[in-house]
Amino acid sequence: MLRWVITFFILAVVAALFGFTGLAGTFADIAKFIAVIFVVLFIAGLVYSAITGRSSTPRL
């Protein structure tokens, strides 16, 4: 998810440099939204592993 946030942030910066302010704002909003989802899922994973005492990631 962090790759998506970084990608949309870079797209927002490039769009702003070329003068596409509406598109840059949209990319920035998408990046913020995905960043919030990432933080919420990260905290949920930490809480899950703290409560159950085991990892929240499946074994491969």
Image (cartoon, rainbow, N blue to C red):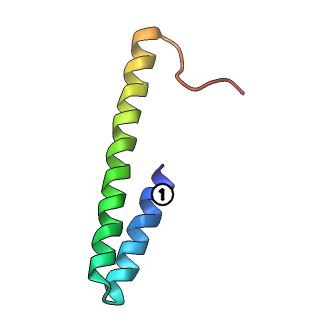
List x then y, in percent, for residue 34. Answer: 38, 51
| Lateral position of residue 60 relative to residue 28, left or right | right
Residue 43, compared with residue 5, is above or below; it is above
Residue 30, compared with residue 20, is above or below; it is above
Task: Give the residue drawn at x 32%, y 85%.
Answer: 20
| Residue at image mark 1 | 4
Q: Label 1's element?
A: helix
Task: Give the residue drawn at x 42%, y 71%.
Answer: 10
Residue 35, compared with residue 12, is above or below; it is above
Task: Give the residue drawn at x 27%, y 81%.
Answer: 21
Furthest residue to the top?
A: 52
Q: Nearer the viewer, residue 4 or 51?
A: 4
List x then y, in percent, for residue 11. Answer: 42, 73
Task: Give the residue drawn at x 27%, y 71%.
Answer: 25
**Count of numbered circles in the view:** 1
List x then y, in percent, for residue 30. Answer: 35, 59
The image quadrant that residue 60 belongs to is top right
List x then y, in percent, for residue 43. Answer: 35, 30
Residue 14, compared with residue 56, is above or below; it is below
